[in-house]
Amino acid sequence: MNITFKGNPNTLEGNTLEVGDVAPDFLVSDNNLRPLTLEDTSGKRVFVSVPSLDTAVCDREVRRFNKDATRIKDVSIYVISMDLPFAQKRWCGNAGIEAVKTVSDYKDRSFGQNYGTYIQELGLLTRAVFVIDEDNKITYVEYCEEVTQEPDYDKVLQAVSI
């Protein structure tokens, strides 16, 4: 998969996923440093991979998904970044983010490796969205070709409503 950051090519490590794949497991940390795995989640889910909450594009994206999460029922939205859990918690509090859950891949990088979102050159996750159904099947995948561009929100919402 070819992605760029501000026009410069970057290398993604890990497994690139496609619609129809079974969602791989992962081990991330919630905002209280508790572990969270795929098995700890259920129902229809959206996993949103972002480089860092503390950037303008990620800020807009997470705020948008937070707003969308209040309108769509029976869907959990998880935002995954390499930000430390303490920073995520502080950012969410300052931004009024309550409808999405932020989790950190800082410790094991397993989400980045298993979902093919770890940017080798930056040590961050790329911008990507995965919609997972109740049977852990991937129903939508979007790896943003340019890290500084937001995902196609309408397509994500359409995939969630199917």
Image (spheres, grey):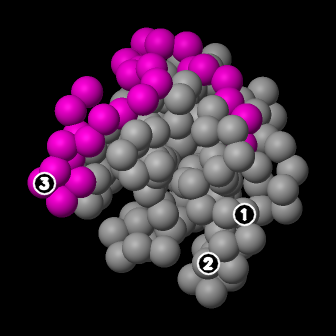
Q: Secondary structure at mark 2?
A: helix
Q: Which residue is mark 1?
A: 85
> Is 144 rendered above or below residue 44?
below
Seen at 39% across and 42% down, the residue is: 119
In three-dimensional space, the C-alpha distance between marks 3 and 2, rounded to whole angstroms, equals 28 Å
In three-dimensional space, the C-alpha distance between marks 1 and 2, rounded to whole angstroms, equals 10 Å
User: For the residue carrying disc 1, how many other residues have a C-alpha within 10 Å: few (<14), some (14-19), or many (20+)?
Assistant: many
Q: Is residue 30 left or right of residue 19?
A: right
- In this figure, what is the number of numbered marks? 3
**Magenta stretch: residue 2 in it?**
yes
Where residue 67 appears, as percent x and y from the top left, is 49, 68
In three-dimensional space, the C-alpha distance between marks 1 and 3, rounded to whole angstroms, equals 29 Å
Q: Which mark is residue 91?
A: 2
Return the disc, 1 or 3, that comes first in the chain's sequence. 3
Q: Amino acid at mark 1?
A: Pro
Where residue 139 appears, as percent x and y from the top left, is 43, 24
Q: Amino acid at mark 3?
A: Gly
> Is 76 rendered above or below residue 54?
above
The answer to whether residue 159 shows anywhere in this view is: no
> Is 47 rendered above or below residue 141?
below
Q: Which mark is residue 7?
A: 3
Seen at 67% across and 30% down, the residue is: 26
Q: Please state, as top left, top right, bottom left or bottom right, where the N terminus lies in the image.
A: top left
Q: Is residue 2 left or right of residue 27?
A: left
Q: Secondary structure at mark 3?
A: loop
Q: In terms of depth relative to the viewer, which is nearer, 83 or 64?
A: 83
Mark 1 or 2, which is nearer the eye? 1
Return the disc, 1 or 2, that comes first in the chain's sequence. 1
- The residues colored magenta run 1-28
Q: Residue furthest left?
A: 7
Q: In terms of depth relative to the viewer, which is nearer, 106 or 134?
A: 106
Mark 1 or 3, which is nearer the eye? 3
